[in-house]
Image (cartoon, coloured by chain):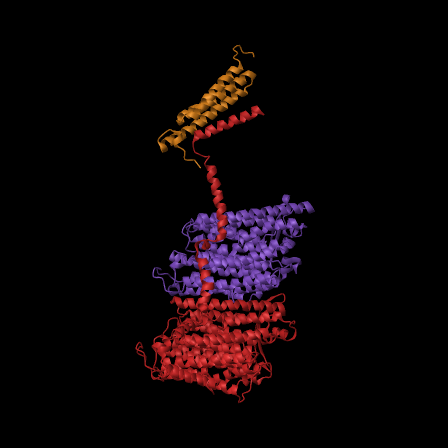
Chain colours: A red, B purple, C orange
Amino acid sequence: MHLLWAIPALPLAGFLILFLTEGRLPRSVVSSIGAGSVGLAALLTGYVAWQFTSSDSSEFVSSSWTWMIVGEFNVSFRLWVDALSLVMVSVITGVGFLIHWYATGYMSEEEGYSRFFCYMNLFVFAMLILVMGDNLLLLFLGWEGVGLCSYLLIGFFHKVPEFGYAARKAFVVTRVGDTFLIIALFLIFKQVGSLQIQEGLTFARESMPDPATINTIICLLLLGGAVGKSAQVPLQTWLPDAMAGPTPVSALIHAATMVTAGVYLIARMQDFFMLSQTAMLCVAAVGLVTLFIASFTALVQSDIKRVLAYSTMSQIGYMFFALGVGAWSAGLFHLMTHAFFKALLFLASGSVILAMHHEQNMFKMGGLWKKLPIPFIAMLVGSAALVALPLTSGFFSKDAILLTAWKNSPYAILFWTVAVIAAFLTSLYTVRMMVLTFFGKPQSEMHELKKESLWHPSRIRTVVPFGLLAVLSIAGGWMGFEFTSDLFGDKGVHAEFHFDPIALLTLGIPFAGVVVGYFLFASDLVDRRKIIKNRLSDLLSKFWHSGWGFDWLYDTLVVKPFRFIAQTRTNRNDIVDLFFKLIKFLASLFHHILSMFQTGHVRWYAFTMVGGLLLVFLAVVWI
Amino acid sequence: MSVMLLILLLLGAGVVAWVSERVNTTLPNWIALITFVATTLWVLVIWFNGPDTDGLYANLNREWIPRFGIDLHLRVDALSLMLIGLTTFLGIVAVVSSWTETKTRHGFFQFNILWVMAGVIGVFSAFDLFLFFFFWEVMLIPMYFLIAIWGHEDKEYASMKFFLFTQISGLLMLVAIVALVWINYNISGVLTFDYDVLKEANLDIATARLLMLGFFIAFITKLPSVPVHTWLPDAHTQAPTAGSVILAGILLKTGAYGIIRFVVPMFNEASKEFWVWGMSLGVISILYGGYLAYSQTDFKRLVAYSSIAHMGFILVGVYSFSKLGTQGAIITMIAHGFSTAALFMMAGAIQERLHTREMSKMGGLWVRAPRMGAVTMFFVVASVGMPGLGNFIGEFLVLIGAFQKSVVLTVFAAIGIVVAAVYGLSLMQRSFQGVPNPDVPKMHDFAFREMSVMVLLMIALVWVGIYPQSLLQMTAPLLSELLRPTL
Amino acid sequence: MTTALSIPLEHVFFLAIILFLIGAFGVLIRRNIIFMLLSLEIMMNACGLAFVAAGARWAEPDGQIMFMFILALAAAEVAVALGLVVQLARRFETLDIDRAEELNG
């Protein structure tokens, strides 16, 4: 008897309790329910994973009730877990629990403490359903559910209108992707006759008609959904704004779990994608373009969370790229390691931000390493993994991706070069972030920092998640990606590490980035003012800073025309109604014309009566 | 027999409520509430007793005016039962939502509500076309009074518009009914208004097309669909809260019901030819309604336009001529009844507290009334089409059914999902989120009376959302009868 | 034809027509509502005269019966009309019918 169903049920129960009590519970109870339910789910996941590895079956199923049956159409609430889902579940519950734990401290002084954990638990539940669903509709339920929670949590501080706009933007932009996804669902149902994932995959493997144009369309639609949720070009614009949410939210939703749902979706629908070269190429291209754009953008941001947001975007770009070149296991591996180190980075930055009284501008920080040693160390570890320094987890996964790209992709040189340039840029912006935040002179605007002893109970809930995540960020890669390569059997490709120039170059690029970054941002060898004053670099920096102008583009092309027409007065009053108003106008016109004959003069009436009588007489006489 | 008693009970309770206002002004409220609770329970009992061997829950067939072949034929199958249940349940919502809103003529107010509901139940169960038309008119007149007497600032205009639209379209239907009966008489020599007989009438296709249009126009006016929707925003905006709840929750469904029950099975061939038009009208309604919803600044008007968009899904579903689409349309009817009733109730509650529906005068209400905020969020999210809640099930089934028929139209309809997100969230943002408006007076949050109804509605929506099978399996046997040889 | 005194029917009708026209012109031309009513009475009496004469000519009682009806009608009319006159006088403080043109469309 495995307790699969209980994994999502626990956060759901947490959500329900917090929802129904309407914030009347004391904070300590709220935090034990909020974080505890996810913690229990994490323990349970460990137990199920242990059962899974020790059993022979390659899937665990937990059926509950029928959702709907209409003719051929049949979906159930049925959980289905294989190794791939289980990795996702572990990341969600494990990292999720650490973030929840951290959040009990981070949010302790905010209003709406209970509401926060309520949403967070709902999120974990929805995310679990997303990865555990046995059919695509259940996946879609989770998919929309996490979108909703993302919306709710970005706009958590609902008194600030900008946050509300950011939340709406996130929801609407991802909804565009979701529409692609749902159309993909329709098409799959039309082709396969079922929305069960496994049936679909079997169909794709065995009876997909050839040439599979339909299949390519399905894949591209799925990619559209994935692009929206995972903030890839061209639907990436919502993610930086989503940083309006509290930092634990950014860590959980916009770094570790939800934004990687797109990667999961593509990995899950692997058999469809394997059939279509075009679709695979598109996936790789989307990843690569995002990677490239986001890395440059991250280089010029001043808000520490926005740097991390763009970095997330580019790292997910790596994952897409990996999937696109067929390095399925490496992509998934990177998903996992990224969840560790990016969560760590976000949480550490959250501590910094909290210490700075919600100041997020890095130019107003500086020299913090002495005052905030723990976040500093955490950030350092996370950065090392992000930059992919050898022996950190990021190194193993990113290296695997780059090497596979070299060995396996159709446009090896182009792909590899772009990816390596981006890796170089990753080092640059990471070093810049670290230097601006922790080194150099403390800036004058700095506030008096709060002083708390290291082992104060309130610190433990910061230190322990940091510690665990740091360990995972380093050691998470040691098991090697053979671990994830099992997920795809022999279908995935991966490259062994050999000592050849390419491998050494791949290895060396991050170091080069770090060194160059040091000279650029930390040493006095380069006159930074000169660079800043240079017109070209100024222009470039503005362009990059705006995220390559995508926001501007969508604003001009879509948002403004939509709003403009919506807000003109005639439109609000409904053009169609004009037709009926015309009828009304004509009716009252005739009314006025006819009523002119009714003067109210009695003698006029008498005249007309006599006149009419005479007319009748005359008519009678004549005829 | 039981359904006739149900109707008579509502009619009788209406008269009693009217008279009782002389005793006490809250007495009519209680009478109406008790009546609706009792009828809801009654419907539930019928529901759980299950259908007889013919799949019917109640059946009554007596002669009424034998000279013209008019019968008193009331029949309740699964589809009718669901809608009757929705009607009595929303009756509770309507009464509770305007518990304190009415300031004058309390008895007559409840009388009208009870009589509208009686008419609606008649519409949902009449299987004689004359009787159907009779009930169709019975439900309109009290509704007119509800808007014209207790409405807001522009009530005369709105009520007259509502009346004219429904009367003219009703007239078309009457002409079509009489013509159908007459033609059938000429063919078969039997003068009858009976649904089952007329369904089998052997019409030539040209006649069928014309008659179908007569019914179709009447029903899409009620639904409403673009281009005959313009009465709805005015009527909804001006109606008292209970009126809006009934109008959006139930009266619109009579149009959808008419299409499903009469247009498609009775003029099957003609309707099948007509599918492109039907679906296109649906898609236009979805997009146009959604877009106009976004343009509105009036809370109620926004919800009203969103209703047009949601009703578009019903047209798309029905004219996809598939099991999926029809089931989706039925679920949409139910789920939309719950979600929109709640949103209109919310609009009424806000208006009662702030004396405005203008969203620019709201803002930041969440701080003042967190419960109302959470409840609104729930129903906005439902109407945006969140999986796990009722509306999604309906819309999803509609779209997946329609996809088999026409890919292009379905894709356009699916764009409506994005538009729904745009206007739904902007409603939320403009009213409840943001900086609390300093001009807004202190407002009290939902208390037990309003909250209990809202909780019931929430439970209902979640139930439809995660266990729609309970409804689907009831209507499944009907589909072949409703869709006829299409399958 | 048995009556001794015999005025030709045409003469009586001629008189009736003249009376009727006098009445009709009175109604059309006078603005004072009292005079309009008087004119109406004249018109009615003209009709009555025509009826009586015709009845006498054919030796039938119908003509006289009709005249009785007309009398009753006239009485009723005067009762109602004088009520209206009083109202008019009160409301508009005049008897000029043209001032009471409130019923225009």
Q: What residue do we see at 56% from left, 17% from top?
A: C58
Quarter occupied by residue A296: bottom left
Where does the image place residue B413, in percent across and percent down from the top left?
55, 61
Residue B211 can be seen, yes or no = yes
Does B403 appear above or below C39? below
Left or right of C14: which side holds A370?
Answer: left
Residue B80 can be seen, yes or no = no
Viewer-proximal residue, B275 or B126?
B275
Quarter occupied by residue B299: bottom left
Number of marks present in the image shown: 0
Where does the image place residue A305, in percent across and percent down from the top left?
41, 75
Left or right of A127: which side holds A208?
Answer: right
Where does the image place residue A422, in percent across and percent down from the top left?
47, 79
Where does the image place residue B460, in percent across and percent down from the top left?
51, 63
Residue at the limit of the structure toward the front, as seen here? A535
Residue at the limit of the structure toward the bottom, as seen here? A499
Left or right of C78: which side holds B317?
Answer: right
The quarter of the picture where the N terminus of chain A appears is bottom right
The quarter of the picture where the C terminus of chain A appears is top right
Q: What residue do we see at 49% from left, 59% from top?
A: B290
Does A422 appear above or below A592? below
Residue at the limit of the structure toward the right, as seen here? B188
Viewer-proximal residue, B448 or A514?
A514
Viewer-proximal residue, B143 or A349?
A349
Viewer-proximal residue, A335 or A126?
A335
